[in-house]
């Protein structure tokens, strides 16, 4: 599918697709960060929203002082073995907001701990986790909530906690940058898809739909979601792509974050005026 140029979408593209998508707001994916400074020298910097580095084996030194302030994602595929590679990329933090994208797979908790110890923010790709992974998620959320040394946001925990605290929740589609209203993913073959877990599913999202209407009415149409106490914080996120996913574990996790927000509010209310 050919892209519609200069529209409101943010396109997540492989750098090889740059000539086709030039002029749009772009997130660029690459395994070869050294090529970016020269490749993008003539681009309008306002159109580059961020860069995703797909190989932690790559040398990212060329990005250290390039485009200061540009958000960078370091994308892991096997967190249980890749976490030592994060040490190579700490210089990126001098000039960039840098985040580690960590799939929730066995052993991911160690990667989260190393990432936050090195001062990286974290974005978890939670998928539809099985019970064993829910246990590891519970350990990681407890670490995030109780460990004073954690100073960087771990998403989706961080925004969900703030949403409970301020009673102003943001659906996970927005928190984890998979908002179908504004984002599109372009495959290496140039195929344009909905972002994240919606990539391979058919979902009718009206282009002029109001965000809340779209998320609550289309993405959270599942019967379980309609009666779920965490609908406003989740938006039906965990019912995709497999609509029969059992959310019991994820609801417990939302409950932990909700309890922590209530505890935080009580502590602050009880503090000195
Ligand atoms: S936790 Fe599950 S049931 Fe509740 S809103 Fe999210 S996807 Fe729906």
Image (cartoon, rainbow, N blue to C red):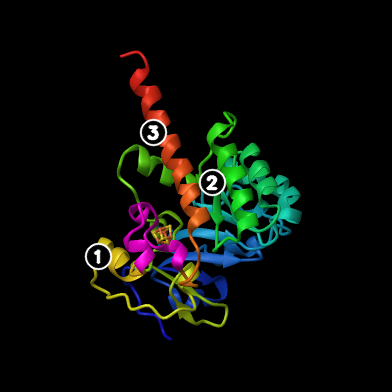
Q: Nearer the viewer, residue 118 or 141?
A: 141
Q: Which residue in the protein does label 3 denote?
A: 262
- Outermost residue on the top side: it is 272
Q: Which residue in the protein does label 2 denote?
A: 96
Start and end of the magenta stretch? 223-239
Q: CA distance from mark 1 to mark 2?
A: 35 Å
| Side of 164 relative to 71 (left or right) | left
| Side of 139 relative to 206 (left or right) | right
The answer as to whether callout 2 falls within 8 Å of ligand 1 is no
Q: Residue at x 63, y 63 (%)?
A: 54
Q: Within the magenta stretch, is there residue 237?
A: yes
Q: Residue at x 65, y 66 (%)?
A: 31
| Side of 162 relative to 168 (left or right) | right
Local SS, label 1: helix
Return the x and y of residue 85 as percentages of the image width and height: 73, 51
Ligand 1 found in image quarter: bottom left
Q: Mark 3 or 2, which is nearer the eye? A: 3
Return the x and y of residue 210 as percentages of the image width and height: 23, 65
Q: Is residue 156 visible?
A: no
Q: Is residue 197 visible?
A: yes
Instruction: Specify the principal SS of the magenta part.
Output: helix
Q: CA distance from mark 1 to mark 3?
A: 28 Å
Q: Residue at x 43, y 86 (%)?
A: 1
Residue 97 vertical position relative to residue 35 in the rendered view, above or below: above
| Side of 263 relative to 269 (left or right) | right
Decide which of tag 1 and tag 3 comes sooner along the chain.
Answer: 1
Q: Within the magenta stretch, is there residue 207?
A: no
Return the x and y of residue 272 as percentages of the image width and height: 35, 13
Q: Which residue in the protein does label 1 denote?
A: 213
């Amino acid at each position: 599918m050919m892209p519609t140029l200069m529209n409101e979408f943010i396109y997540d593209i492989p750098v090889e697709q740059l000539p086709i998508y030039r002029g749009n707001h772009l997130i660029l994916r690459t395994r070869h960060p050294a090529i970016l400074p020269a490749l993008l020298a003539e681009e309008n910097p306002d159109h580059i929203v961020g860069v995703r580095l797909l190989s932690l084996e790559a040398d990212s030194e060329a990005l250290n002082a390039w485009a200061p302030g540009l958000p960078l994602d370091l994308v892991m595929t096997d967190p249980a073995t890749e976490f030592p590679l994060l040490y190579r990329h700490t210089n990126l933090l001098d000039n960039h907001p840098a985040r580690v994208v960590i799939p929730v797979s066995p052993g991911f908790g160690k990667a989260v701990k190393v990432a936050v110890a090195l001062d990286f923010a974290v974005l978890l790709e939670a998928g539809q986790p099985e019970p064993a992974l829910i246990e590891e998620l519970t350990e990681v959320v407890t670490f995030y909530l109780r460990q004073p040394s954690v100073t960087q946001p771990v998403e989706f925990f961080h925004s969900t906690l703030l949403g409970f605290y301020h009673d102003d929740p943001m659906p996970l589609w927005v928190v984890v940058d998979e908002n179908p209203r504004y984002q599109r993913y372009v495959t290496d073959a140039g195929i344009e898809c909905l972002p994240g877990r919606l990539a391979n599913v058919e979902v009718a999202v009206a282009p002029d739909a109001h965000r809340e209407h779209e998320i609550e009415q289309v993405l959270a149409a599942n019967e379980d979601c309609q009666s779920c106490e965490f609908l406003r914080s989740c938006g039906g996120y965990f019912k995709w792509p497999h609509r029969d996913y059992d959310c019991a574990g994820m609801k417990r996790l939302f409950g932990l974050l909700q309890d922590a927000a209530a505890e935080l509010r009580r502590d602050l209310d009880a503090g000195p005026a």
